[in-house]
Structure formats: structure tokens, C-alpha cells
Image: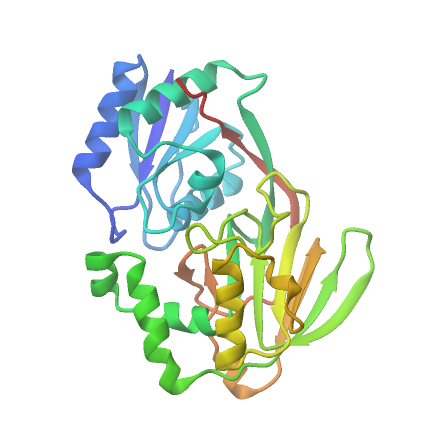
Amino acid sequence: MIVALIHNPASGTFNKLHLDALSRAFQACGAQVKLGRTEKNGQFDIGPECDLVCVSGGDGTLRLVIGSMVRTKMSQPLCIFPAGTVNLVAKELGYSSDPEIFAREIMAGYLDKETARLEAPLVTSDGQPFVACISAGPDGQAVARHSPALKKRIGGAAYAWSLIKLLGDWPKLRFSLAVEAPDGTTEHLNCSAVYVIKARYYAGSWVLAPTAELGSRHFQVILLTRARRRDFFRFLIQIARGRNPAELAFVQSLPARRLTIIAKDKISRLAAFQADGDMLPGQPHEIRMAGQSVTYCLPIPE
């Protein structure tokens, strides 16, 4: 069995010792490991001779790897070792962060093709897949302003610090949305912040859409009709308490198979969008179910 072990050397959380430990753990289970790396421009290919693709990194690295697999029409199962700052997919699928346990559970899952597989329909943003979430709102602007050096030192807490600094220059954004529901009907809405949710978790252990999951054939659109400071912090408190944010009067949650986003003024056209914890180079216009899927190899606990 050949495992293509792909990592992102440019990631702020990359650790060669952890990568080597994971490689040795797979080899101890009888697998042959072929190391690969992502490229800064996202244009890289994975050797098609592998039996399993393993991503060592976070959701952003996983997004790059899936993009490469889609581009080269690879259909091998994949898994993700949670080595990034944001590991929402790994958390949802129950992957261990211990290299030896991870390798043993994945090898057991690989052999059990009947039960240890998850077909995850893909969502694309202007034709490029993402894996967990896309958002534009106060927290997205905080992601845009965070310090990469600080992120490397303190991890996800760097985003919280950026959000605190944002209080003095609060963004006032306006977007027009066209949300196409799974039944084909379309609703036109306005909002000040929008979250497109495919995975269950957001920004760690928070849940914005209780019904969202990787295996779903639609995604969830969470929108804030207003996002003043007090509104946004009520939104955060609601989530932190484990409550559905859609219970708030200014929050709506809709299932969708297609979404178009139009910025309504100059400030909004300059607003940052983030995907899977990374900044997008430009604002997305169309987000939709792609009609394709990837197969995750699930762990079988010892």
C-alpha cells in the first residue's frame, strides 16, 4: 500500500519532526510513504500511483490538496492529520492528533471499505473547492488584519486579538444575496455579514449551523441582517453558549445549493473574505454544489 503524505511547508504550524513521526507511523503499519508538498501558487499534482492521500496540515492545506485531486481527476480516498491552526474537518471526522494512533486507525479504516468511508459532496467558490467555510463579516476582517508572525507564536488566539483591535474601526458592510434552496426556489436577501457553512464546526468547537455536515448535499447560509458591535457580540455569545444563532431576530439560516453574492457599496467591495481560515485573493461571486465529491477514509478507533 502506498500513502501519499502531503504537507504545506509554508504553513505557520509546519513541524518537520511531526511529519517524520507520522511517516514512520505509517511505515510501522506496513505502508510505503511518498512525501509531497503543496506549492504557494496552489498548482501542484499528486502522484496517481498512491492508494491513499494523507494531508498533514489544516483545512487550508486540505483545500489545496482537494483542488489538485479534482483538477487531476483523482478518486483515491483521503484523510487529514490535524497539524494546522484550524482543523475543522479533522475534528468532525474524529481523526487523532497522535501520529501513531492516527496511522493505526486510518490503516484499519482503509481496509474496511464498507463502513469506513464518507462521500463528501464538494462545494465550490467561483469554481474552486473549499472544505469547511467561507465568510465575510467582522471576524473575516479580523482574519485579514492578523499578524502571521503572531499567528505562528500563539496560533488561533491571533485572530481573537485582531478582532479586539477591530473594535475601534468597525466594518459596516452591505451585501445582496440570491440564495437558491435545495428545492430550486430562490430568495433574495440583504445582509451585513454572511457565513457559508459546509462542515459542522466553525473557528474551533463553535457550531453556527447545527444541521451542517460534510456529507450533506447542500450547504448552510448564515446571514446577519445587521452586524453592529452589540449585534455581533450577541451573535458570538449565542454561539459560545451552544445555542443556535438563528434564534436571534437579526440572524437567518438557510439551506442552499447555490449562492450569489454582490457587494452593494465601495467599502463592501473591499471587504475581505476568508475560506477555511485563509484569505481569498478576491471576493467570491458564486458558491454552489459542484456535482462532484471526495471520499474520506474514516478512522476505526482501537
Residue 73 screen position, x and y as percent:
54, 35
Q: In which quarter of the image is the N terminus?
A: top left
Give the camera-side residue of 276 and 280.
Answer: 276
- The foreground one among 63 and 157 is 157
- Judge whether 215 appears above or below 126 on screen: above
Instruction: Classify residue 28 by image quadrant.
Output: top left
Q: Answer yes or no: is residue 126 visible.
A: no
Q: Quadrant of residue 300?
A: top left
The residue at 79%/64% (across/down) is 186
Residue 14 located left or right of residue 139: left
Residue extending farthest to the left is: 17
Residue 266, percent from left and from top: 53, 87
Residue 140 seen by the camera: yes
Closer to the camera in the image, 48 or 26 = 26
Q: In this view, does 120 lie above or below 142?
A: above
**Quadrant housing residue 168:** bottom left
Q: Which residue lies furthest to the front in this view?
A: 241
Residue 155 percent coordinates (x, y): 27, 56
Q: In this view, does 123 lie to the left or right of 232?
A: right
* Relative to 8, residue 263 above or below: below
Residue at 82 percent of width and 52 percent of height: 183
Q: In this view, does 48 lie above or below 278?
A: above
